């Protein structure tokens, strides 16, 4: 027998209050209910360290599921920095809501311990990615936007591409600014919106930006380049786009409501993602099982059951697009 309507109404009101409280734990919102990413610690771009060329002198701390860490990991990969920068992967501790080291790192069990030891503001969250200097015993930078710039300036492996060539700097900056707000943070602004209007605004901006990328790629496609800022290799603009796009069908569409259009309807973008994924070493930075379990398992206010979906299989997202059905719209 169905419970009485008054009981259902009361339960819904109570749950809604609880939900609002729990959402506050995911991050702050403005008075319109729009998610606002909190500022972190170690946010400025440091100078290139004098010992940057020393083997193993620095450590890039990343988490598998984090898209901000992913962009740093990609930059490290594309620049071939394994000889001078080690990587350490932290794993989520959902019960405590923080990152922990699998084996103690510099005597620390958790990333928070390391942040505290490095003198971070006690109120700051301990986030990935972070670049740590062994010689100084200090986190140099943990804001991914600056971190990827530092890694691009780092002494690189022979033949590694410059991901921000001088002539492309203005175009890269323009793309990065839009992608950061409307796409990288945009998916979170969809998922963490506190009301319909806040979601609608973020969702519209997200898909407008993706369509702008599609149009940009089409323009370059005609002149023979397949990357966002032209040229023969990807730039930092491509690097920041990839972590969000590769998680789209796996996480952001089903969990954050970023599902207005399937990506195969943006064929240049689909192909761009396939080509980026095929770059040397990029597949080694992709962990679809961890992405699914970390997002669906940990974001309790968005998904209280914690049930982790089975798919889709990443291989189906980085192959050829499905053939359009006869008469199906191409846009
Ligand atoms: N602004 C930071 C954001 C990084 C960030 O939010 N990382 C998340 C994982 S996706 C994190 O470590 N969160 C832990 C926490 O907030 O306690 C950046 O871009 O580097």
Image (spheres, rainbow, N blue to C red):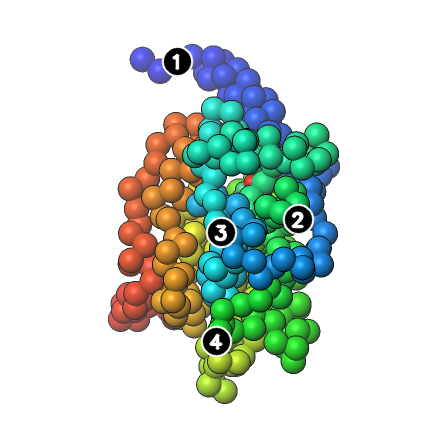
Could you tell whether 86 is left or right of 321 in the image? Answer: right
Dots 2, 4 in contact, CB < 8 A: no
Kindly state the secondary structure of the residue where label 4 is placed. loop
- Spatial CA distance of label 4 from label 3 is 20 Å
**Element assignment for label 3:** strand
Instruction: Give whichever of discs 3 and 1 has the lower sequence position.
Output: 1
Provide the secondary structure element on which disc 1 rests.
loop
Q: Quadrant of residue 216?
A: bottom right
Instruction: Count residues near mark 2 (Cα–Cα under 10 Å), then give few for <14, some for 14-19, many for 20+.
Output: many
Q: Secondary structure at mark 2?
A: strand
Q: Which residue is mark 3?
A: 86
Q: Residue at x 29, y 52 (%)?
A: 313
Q: Mark 4 — residue?
A: 159
Tell me how far mark 3 sits from mark 2, CA to CA: 14 Å
Mark 1 or mark 2: which comes first in sequence?
1
Image point (58%, 40%), residue name? 127
Q: Which mark is residue 140?
A: 2
Residue 156 is situated, as x and y percent measured from the top left of the image, at: 53, 68
Which label sits in the foreground, 1 or 4? Answer: 4
């Amino acid at each position: 027998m169905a419970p009485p309507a008054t009981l259902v109404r009361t339960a819904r009101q109570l749950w809604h209050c609880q939900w609002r409280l729990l959402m506050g734990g995911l991050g702050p919102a403005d008075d319109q209910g729009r998610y606002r990413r909190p500022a972190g610690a170690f946010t400025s771009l440091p100078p290139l360290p004098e010992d940057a060329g020393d083997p193993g002198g620095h450590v890039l701390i990343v988490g598998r599921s984090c898209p901000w860490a992913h962009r740093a990991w990609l930059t490290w990969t594309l620049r071939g920095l394994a000889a001078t920068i080690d990587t350490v992967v932290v794993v989520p501790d959902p019960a405590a809501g923080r990152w922990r080291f699998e084996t103690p790192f510099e005597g620390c069990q958790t990333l928070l311990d390391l942040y505290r030891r490095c003198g971070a503001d006690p109120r700051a969250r301990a986030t990935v990615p972070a670049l740590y200097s062994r010689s100084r015993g200090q986190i140099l930078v943990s804001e991914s936007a600056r971190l990827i710039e530092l890694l691009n300036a780092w002494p690189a492996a022979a033949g590694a591409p410059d991901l921000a060539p001088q002539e492309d700097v203005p175009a890269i900056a323009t793309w990065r600014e839009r992608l950061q707000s409307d796409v990288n943070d945009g998916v979170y602004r969809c998922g963490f919106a506190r009301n319909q209007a806040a979601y609608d605004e973020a969702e519209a901006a997200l898909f407008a930006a993706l369509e702008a990328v599609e149009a940009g790629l089409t323009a370059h496609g005609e002149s023979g380049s397949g990357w966002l800022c032209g040229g023969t290799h990807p730039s930092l603009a491509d690097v920041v786009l990839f972590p969000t796009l590769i998680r789209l069908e796996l996480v952001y569409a089903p969990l954050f409501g970023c599902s207005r259009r399937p990506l195969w309807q943006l064929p240049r973008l689909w192909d761009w993602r396939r080509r980026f994924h095929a770059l040397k070493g990029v597949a080694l930075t992709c962990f679809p099982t961890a992405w699914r379990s970390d997002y669906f398992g940990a974001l309790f206010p968005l998904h209280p059951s914690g049930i982790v979906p089975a798919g889709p299989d990443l291989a189906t997202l980085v192959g050829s697009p499905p053939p359009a059905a006869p008469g199906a719209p191409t846009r």
